[in-house]
Image: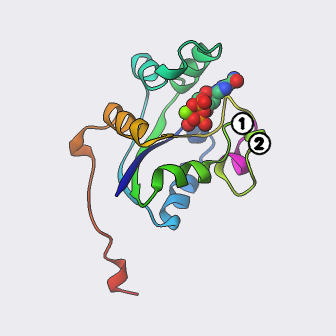
Amino acid sequence: MERTFLMVKPDGVQRNLVGEIVSRFEKKGYNLVGAKLMTVSKDLAETHYAEHKERPFFGELVDFITSGPVFAMVWEGEKVISTARTMMGATNPADAAPGTIRGDFAAQVAMNVIHGSDSPESAVREIGIFFKEEELNTYDKTISKWV
Ligand code: RTP
Ligand code: MG
């Protein structure tokens, strides 16, 4: 079973979108295995976005992601890494389809509401830098017994 790292960015927390975003992944049928509201340090932001350190927007990206609390999450499910990216929509909200999170709630690339791991390697790396093993919960949903 795959796991991915998702994060409601500071704009999403400020705009009260945490519940809406959690709800979409819950309704899809994925299992939430870890979650916390946290403020990202400069060090953590630079590690998380290390692949972009030569890009012109790196400084702004780090300033933005450390500007207020984020809601960090780990979700589990079949093909959750690529499907979560589809549910998020294109990086630039101007290109994101309606029905996706960025398509529905974001208007500019610098404030695009949500982050999601882009590959199995990124997911392992990002889960490891944001969460301790004891913060993650593996469990089965028992709902199928009741419906
Ligand atoms: P993320 O890592 O946040 O999930 O986004 P992503 O994979 O869809 O996009 P990525 O290429 O990894 O870019 C990381 C974040 O950098 C910001 N960005 N700004 N000003 C710009 O041209 C620009 N390009 C990218 C975005 O907020 C993007 O989510
Ligand atoms: Mg990315």
Q: Which residue is mark 1?
A: 92
Give me the disc on residue 95: 2
30 or 2: nearer the viewer: 2
Image height of 22 relative to 93, above or below: below
| Magenta span | 102-107
**Ligand 2 - quadrant of the structure image:** top right
Query: In percent of the image, x 49 and y 24: which residue is there?
Result: 49
What type is the residue that disc 1 sits on? Asn
Residue 131 visible from this viewpoint: yes
Q: Residues within 10 Å of mark 1 (few under 14, many from 20)?
A: some
Q: Position of residue 23 (x, y in %)?
A: 53, 60
What type is the residue that disc 2 sits on? Asp
Residue 9 visible from this viewpoint: no
The secondary structure that most of the magenta stretch takes on is: helix
Kind of element beneath mark 1? loop
Query: In percent of the image, x 52 and y 65: which residue is there?
Result: 28
Please tell me whether residue 36 belongs to the stretch shown in magenta.
no
Query: Any atom of ligand 1 within 8 Å of the CB at mark 1?
Result: yes
71 or 118: nearer the viewer: 118
Give me the disc on residue 45: none
Query: In percent of the image, x 58 and y 23: which residue is there?
Result: 64
